[in-house]
Image (tube, grey):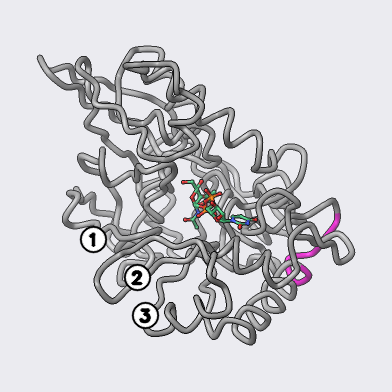
Amino acid sequence: MKIQQNISLKPYNTFGIHTNAKRFISVNSLKDLKELIASEKNIFILGGGSNILLTADVEKLVVHLNTKGIIVNDFNDKVLVTAEAGENWHELVLWCVSQNYGGLENLALIPGNVGTSPIQNIGAYGVEIKDVFQQLEAIEISTGKTKIFTNEDCNFGYRNSVFKNELKGKYIITNVTFKLTKKNHSVNISYGAIRNLLTEKENPSIKEIADAVIAIRQSKLPDPKEIGNSGSFFKNPVIQVELFKELTKKYPEIPHYIISENEIKIPAGWLIEQCGFKGKRFGDAGVHEKQALVLVNYNNASGKEIYDLAQKIQQSVMQNFKIALEVEVNII
Ligand code: EPU
């Protein structure tokens, strides 16, 4: 284990933003991680770097968690799959699909690593991690003690968990266990675009679902290897029914999902598109041409440029719709 000085973080964040880590260390085992945190408390844990926007050099010691391994506990009707934090998320999904383990297929092609997936309760196409989550293990930085978190302990919500709130920066997630099906998979095709792609199939297999999800994502989301991005930059806002009624007078076609009697969720991508930002480019910072919820770095944008664009969008959406867009990505 060796601490390196002044390392560019460009290869370590999917936005492809260049800032420096004053000090940087790659950790490949749990033993090394425990040894490290016995002496270093002021650390910044870096997983797949897929949900961060770096706006400045990082003063804390950047710990790149690179632990690997998958363990399977087979039961008659189900299987528990435990993956180490440093495993790549999409590779885990593909591996589960290849074993015919069902549950993660709707979450194919989401960038990032296993260890950070529960922090924002990653979700797509009708499924969220909380639906298949069994437990996770995490180390408390201040004490070095390991704690198991159940689904309830994580307090999952829409793109949210206890690790984004009261326990923010306090624990390092070291592995996550998923409860998957081995047979009689009840696949989730609630999302219209998946249903449309699979119209011919009576009982689509989990492989067919994963393939459909991959095709949909590739058709409208930019590949971070080609254009820097962090997926959805904002959360989809939930508004009160009174405001919704007011907005429908001017925008009768406003897309929406009913959350409860009083609450309506509006796709942020639609709001941003209505404000005229879709496909717009400001220097190297831009709004993706096929999905307005995704901000992109065409090459050399700084974190500040992306952040300034995000603020411009928030102001415009506020002015036009009286809706406050909440940032989903962690601004560092
Ligand atoms: N829309 C537009 N213009 C756009 C984009 C979207 O009008 O440029 C409207 C359309 O009406 C469309 C609707 O928004 O039908 C929903 O769009 P989409 O299906 O692309 O989903 P989203 O609500 O924009 C969410 C997640 C995505 C996830 C998809 C599919 C959030 C913040 N984002 O996006 O997650 O892949 O649903 O389930 O909830 C991510 O978190 O990084 C992410 C990509």
Indicate the position of residue 324 as horizontal and vertical percent values. 52, 80
- Towards the viewer: 313 or 68: 313
Residue, disc 1: 155
The mark closer to the camera, 3 or 2, is 3
Give the spatial CA distance, label 3 vs label 1. Answer: 23 Å
Residue beneath the point at 21% across and 42% down: 135
Residue, disc 2: 165
Residue, disc 3: 240
Residue beneath the point at 65% across and 67% down: 272
| Number of numbered discs visible in the structure rendering | 3
Res. 195 in view: yes
Give the spatial CA distance, label 3 vs label 2. Answer: 24 Å
Asked whether mark 1 lies closer than 8 Å to ligand 1, one says: no
Residue beneath the point at 85% across and 51% down: 299
- Going from N to C along the chain, the mark reached first, 1 or 2, is 1
Residue range of the region highlighted in magenta in the rendering: 300-305
Which class describes the residues within 10 Å of circle 1: few (<14), some (14-19), or many (20+)? some
Indicate the position of residue 51 as horizontal and vertical percent values. 55, 54
- Towards the viewer: 102 or 54: 102
Asked whether mark 3 lies closer than 8 Å to ligand 1, one says: no
The mark closer to the camera, 1 or 2, is 1
- Towards the viewer: 162 or 24: 162
Q: As drawn, is 198 to the left or to the right of 288?
A: left
- Going from N to C along the chain, the mark reached first, 3 or 2, is 2
Which class describes the residues within 10 Å of circle 2: few (<14), some (14-19), or many (20+)? few
Q: Amino acid at mark 2?
A: Asn
Label 1: which secondary element? loop
Q: Amino acid at mark 1?
A: Asn
CB contact under 8 Å: marks 3 and 1: no
